[in-house]
Image (tube, rainbow, N blue to C red):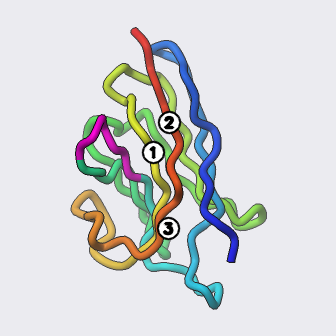
C-alpha cells in the first residue's frame, strides 16, 4: 500500500501560501474512508483537526482557518490536498493527513483516525 507521505510543507513568511498534498488515505482494499482530513500538532501537544472532507464532498474547517484553508480531493491524481493562503504564525505546526470514520467535522478526534500520514512541517514567521 502507498505510504502516506505528505509534501508541500516549509518555512514561509506571514501572508504567504502553501499547498500540502498526500496520497489519499484508503483502506488496504482501496475502499474510501468516510472521512478524510488534516490535523495539526503544535510543539509537543496533541494533534487537532484543521479541516475535513467526507465521502459526500462536505467540508468543514475550524474557525481559525475558515476562509484561508481549502481541503480538496484530486481523484485523478488520487491525492488529498490542503491549500493554505494568508498564513499566520499561529498556523505553525506539523500537519498530518488522515483517514477514518465518523464523526466527520470539527469534532473529529485522533482516536477516530484509522490511518495517518507521517507529517510535514509548516513554519510561519511574522
Residue 99 vs 59, above or below: the answer is: below
Residue 58 vs 64, above or below: the answer is: below
Q: Residue at x 46, y 63 (%)?
A: 98
> Where, by quadrant of the figure, is residue 95 drawn?
top left
CA gap, disc 1 and disc 3: 21 Å
> In the rendering, which numbered label is found on residue 12?
none
Q: Residue furthest top?
A: 126
Q: Is residue 40 magenta?
A: yes
Question: At which x and y percent is residue 80?
Answer: 59, 58
> In the rendering, which numbered label is found on residue 121?
2
Q: Are marks 1 and 2 in contact (CB under 8 Å)?
A: yes
Sequence-wise first label, 1 or 3: 3
Q: Which residues are magenta?
A: 39-45
Secondary structure of residue under mark 1: strand
Sequence-wise first label, 2 or 3: 3
Q: Are marks 1 and 3 in contact (CB under 8 Å)?
A: no
Q: Residue at x 47, y 71 (%)?
A: 115
Q: Residue at x 28, y 35 (%)?
A: 64
Residue 87 falls left or right of residue 83: left
Q: What is the crowding at mark 1: few (fewer than 14 residues within 10 Å), some, or many (at least 20)?
A: many
Dot 3 corresponds to which residue? 57
> In the rendering, which numbered label is found on residue 95?
1
Q: Residue furthest bottom?
A: 29
Q: Residue at x 22, y 62 (%)?
A: 107
Q: What is the crowding at mark 3: few (fewer than 14 residues within 10 Å), some, or many (at least 20)?
A: few
Q: Quadrant of the C terminus?
A: top left
Sequence-wise first label, 1 or 2: 1
Secondary structure of residue under mark 3: loop
Mark nearest the camera among 2 and 3 is: 2
Residue 68 falls left or right of residue 117: left
Amino acid at each position: 500500500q502507498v505510504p502516506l507521505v505528505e509534501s508541500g510543507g516549509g518555512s514561509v513568511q506571514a501572508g504567504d501560501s502553501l499547498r500540502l498534498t498526500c496520497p489519499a488515505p484508503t483502506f488496504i482494499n482501496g475502499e474510501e474512508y468516510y472521512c478524510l482530513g488534516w490535523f495539526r500538532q503544535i510543539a509537543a501537544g496533541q494533534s487537532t483537526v484543521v479541516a475535513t472532507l467526507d465521502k459526500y464532498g462536505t467540508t468543514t474547517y475550524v474557525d481559525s482557518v475558515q476562509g484561508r484553508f481549502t481541503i480538496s480531493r484530486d481523484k485523478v491524481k488520487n491525492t488529498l490536498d490542503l491549500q493554505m493562503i494568508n498564513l499566520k504564525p499561529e498556523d505553525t505546526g506539523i500537519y498530518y493527513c488522515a483517514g477514518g470514520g465518523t464523526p466527520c467535522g470539527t469534532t473529529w478526534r485522533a482516536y477516530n483516525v484509522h490511518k495517518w500520514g507521517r507529517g510535514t512541517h509548516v513554519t510561519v514567521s511574522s
